[in-house]
Image (cartoon, rainbow, N blue to C red):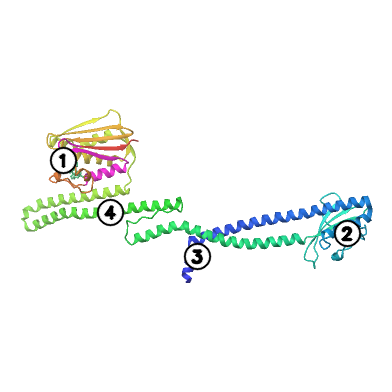
Amino acid sequence: MSLKKKADFLRTTTFRLTLWYTTVFGGLSFVVFIIIYVSLMSHLKEQTDNELLNKAKEFSVLYDNHGTQALQSEFRRESESSGIKRVFFRLLSPQGEILVSSDLRQWTWLKSSRNQSGYTVEKGFSFNTLSLPNHQHKVRVVSKFTIDGNMIEVGSSLQSNELMMVKYREIFGIALMIMLICGGFVAWLLARKVMSGVCRVTQTANRIRKGDLSRRVPLGNEGQEIDALAVAFNGMLERIESLVGELKQVTDNVAHELRTPITRIRGMAEMTLDGDIGEYRELAALVIEESDRLIEMINTMLEIARTDLGVTQLASDPLDLRKTIAEAIDLFKPLAENKNINIHVDTLSQDVIVKGDRSKLQRVVANLLDNAIKYTSSGGKIVVSARMEDLQAVITIADTGIGIDTNDIPKIFDRFYRGDKSRTTFGSGLGLSLALTIVKAHGGDITVDSSLDTGSVFTIILPLT
Ligand code: ADP
C-alpha cells in the first residue's frame, strides 16, 4: 500500500470506528479482568486465613488441654498430611525459643522470634505476611497466644495462590489478545456495513456528477439512519431532476415565446427605417407596447419561478376573501361592462378568513376573472362566490364562455399553454400557471370543470386559518 493510500485509509470513518470500538472493548475487558483479579485474590487470601485460623484454634485448644506432647505429635501429623514444604507449625516461648514444632528443615530461614507485627482480626490472633528477599513466594502466618504466655505460630506458603494468579494473568493476557483481534475484526465488519450505506450514497452522487440524474440510491438494511439518508438523498435528486426538467422546459418555452415578439419588434424597427418620418411615432408606440408585453411576460415567468422555488417570501396575514374578491371585481367591472358581461357576486354574509398574501391572492382572483371576461362573449354572465367548506375556503368563478376542450383541461395550467380556441385572443399562456403556483404555495389547489356548451367553473381551495 502506498504512503498516500495508507494515510487515506487511516482517515476513513471505517478505520476510526474500528479503532474506537476496539479501544472501548479492550478497555472494558481490562476493567473486568481487574475486578475478577482483585476479587479472586481477596477470596484466596480469605480462604487461606480461615484455614490457618482454624488450625491455630485447634492447636491452642489441644495445647491448653493436653500439653506439649500432644501438640508435638499433632504438629507432625498435620504437617506431613499438608506437606512439610507448604506448612509449618511451632510453639514459641515468650523469649522466642522454639518449644515444639513441625519439621522445619524447609523453613530454616524462619527467625527464632515471634512474628508479632501483623494485624489482629480476631481477639488473641494476629496475621502476618512474610516475604524474604531470597525467597520467591510469600508466607502467611497466624499467631496465637496460649494461656501460659507461649505463642503458637501456624504458617503456610502462598506459592499455590501466587501460581494461580500468575496462571490467571497469563490466560487473561492470551484471551485479551484473541478478544481484541476478534473484536477488532467484528468492529471492522460492523463499521464497514454501517458505512456501506454512505458509500452507496457517495457512489450514486459520483455517477450523478457525470450526468445521470435518473439514478437513485438503493435502500439497504444498514439501519434506519442510513435508510433515512438514502431516502432524503433520493428525495433531493427527485427535486433536482424535476427542477432541471422544468428549467429545460421553461428555457425551451422562453426561447420559443420570446422569438415571436422580438421578431415583431425587429420588423417594426425595419419598417421605421424604410417608412416615412410621419409613421415614426406610430411605430415607436407599437414597439413600446410590444416591449411592455415582453417585460410583463418575463416578470410573470420570474414570479412563477420564484414562488414555485419558495424564493419569494409570502406574507401570512389573516385576510377576508370576500374583500379580496370585491377589490378584484371593482378592478375588472369596467372591462366587463365594455363587453356587456354581467358579474354577479354570491358570497356569504359570514367572513371567509384565510392566512395568506393579500396581493398574491388578489392576483389569482384577478387572473381567473380576467380569463372569464376574456373567454366569455358579449351578453354572458360571470358568477363569483366564496364559502367555507370542511375547514377550507372555496372560491368559484363560473362563466358562460367558450368552455375548454376536454383534451386541453389537463394542460391549461402548464406554462405558455394556450387552448386552440383562444389563440385569436390576446394572452401569454402564463396566467393560470401563476395562479396555481401561488395557490399551491398557500397549501391550496385550483380545479376546473368545463364544457363547451355551458362554460367553465374554476374553483380555488385554500386552507382556513
Ligand atoms: P392565456 O389566457 O393568456 O392564454 P392562461 O394561462 O390564463 O393563459 O390560460 C391558459 C388557457 O386556458 C387559455 O389559453 C385558454 O385556452 C384556457 N382558459 C383559461 N381560462 C378559461 C376560461 N375561463 N374559459 C375558457 N378557456 C379558458
Question: Which mark sits nearer the N-terminus, 1 or 3?
Answer: 3
- Crowd rating for badge 4 (residues with CA inside 10 Å; few <14, some 14–19, many 20+): few
**Residue displayed at 61% across by 63% down:** 177
Q: Which of 69 and 13 is in front in this view?
A: 69
Looking at marks 2 and 4 on the same chain, the residue that comes earlier in the sequence is marked by 2
Q: Name the side, left or right, on which 273 lies relative to 438.
A: left
What is the three-letter code of the residue carrying label 1? Lys
Ligand 1, image quadrant it occupies: top left
Q: Which residue is drawn at 30% across and 28% down?
A: 350
Which residues fall within the magenta stretch?
430-456
Residue at the disc numbered 2: 76
| Residue 162, position as x, y percentages in the image | 74, 61
Compute the Cα span from label 2 to label 4: 103 Å
Does 451 appear in magenta? yes
Q: What element carries label 1?
A: helix
User: In the rendered image of this protein, does residue 344 appear above or below residue 411?
Assistant: above
* Label 1 vs 4, first from the N-terminus: 4
Q: Quadrant of the C terminus?
A: top left
Q: Which mark is residue 10?
A: 3
Residue 245: mark in rendering: 4
Q: In which quarter of the image is residue 215?
A: bottom left
Give SS at disc 4.
helix
Would you name the residue on which mark 1 appears?
374
